[in-house]
Image (cartoon, rainbow, N blue to C red):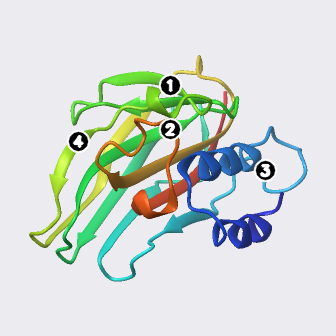
Amino acid sequence: MRLTDFRRYLHCSLSLSTLLTAAAILVQPAGAAGVGAGSTDRIRITPSPHTLLVITSTSRGVYTTGDRLEVGLTVDNGGIDAVVDLYFGMLLPDGSTVVSFTDFGFQVSIGTLADLRSLRPIARNLDLITPFHFSQPEFYSQTWSGSEAPGSYAIFFLAARIGALDDNQLDPEEVVAADVAFFSFTP
């Protein structure tokens, strides 16, 4: 699936499972058809324009051993009547495993796309009624040791209605905003 096809597909469904499954298709081994390793393409979902916007970014599109991955995060909340759980995670090159960051100290929990209940939020029950703007160019960072799996990765940030993943699915109306950025690692 090419990114343009995927973007058309996104307009039909906003489920996290669909989003990350499609991201798994995009996160293909280098040389595979479609968008391959090193892609800097991104997918952003903001169902309610100008209410809550999240933007993730990476310092580059391709990394090797010893490089430092820096993930930027911007959240622009205009003040909406919603309470959300925030998810920040990384889809690994196998296209199934998801590393969830569970707190702002970046402790991790391992989950899978097959069981969305296994994904853990970085923050729960965040009330968005009060407007705020948050921007940090280096929200998360890590240095590649060379022992990580080679291939393409997707890093995502999701704001979803509280408890949205408890039933192992995410319905479009439960998504408040989401953003996905892609990068690759070659040891």
Q: Residue at x 17, y 52 (%)?
A: 126
Q: Are marks 4 and 1 in contact (CB under 8 Å)?
A: no
Q: Give the quarter of the image for residue 42.
A: bottom right
Q: Residue at x 72, y 73 (%)?
A: 8
Q: Are marks 2 and 4 in contact (CB under 8 Å)?
A: no
Closer to the eye: label 2 or 4: 4
In primary-sequence order, the first of circles 2 and 1 is 2
Q: Which residue is mark 4?
A: 123
Q: Which residue is mark 2?
A: 90
Amino acid under label 3? Gly
Q: Are marks 1 and 3 in contact (CB under 8 Å)?
A: no
* Outermost residue toward the bottom in this view: 50
Amino acid under label 4? Ala
Q: Residue at x 65, y 30 (%)?
A: 96
The number of numbered badges drawn on the structure is: 4
Give how far apart the Cα atoms at labels 4 and 1 are: 17 Å
Residue 171 position in % (x across, y down) = 50, 55
Structural crowding at the residue carrying mark 3, measured as other residues with C-alpha within 10 Å and reported as few (<14), some (14–19) or many (≥20):
many
**Which element type, helix, strand or loop, lies under badge 3?**
loop
Residue 165 position in % (x across, y down) = 43, 40
Give how far apart the Cα atoms at labels 2 and 3 are: 17 Å
Closer to the eye: label 4 or 3: 4
Residue 111: image tag: 1
Residue 157 position in % (x across, y down) = 41, 51
**Which element type, helix, strand or loop, lies under badge 2?**
strand
Amino acid under label 2? Met
Q: Which residue is mark 3?
A: 36
The image quadrant where one finds the N terminus is bottom right
**Which element type, helix, strand or loop, lies under badge 4?**
strand
Q: Are marks 2 and 3 in contact (CB under 8 Å)?
A: no
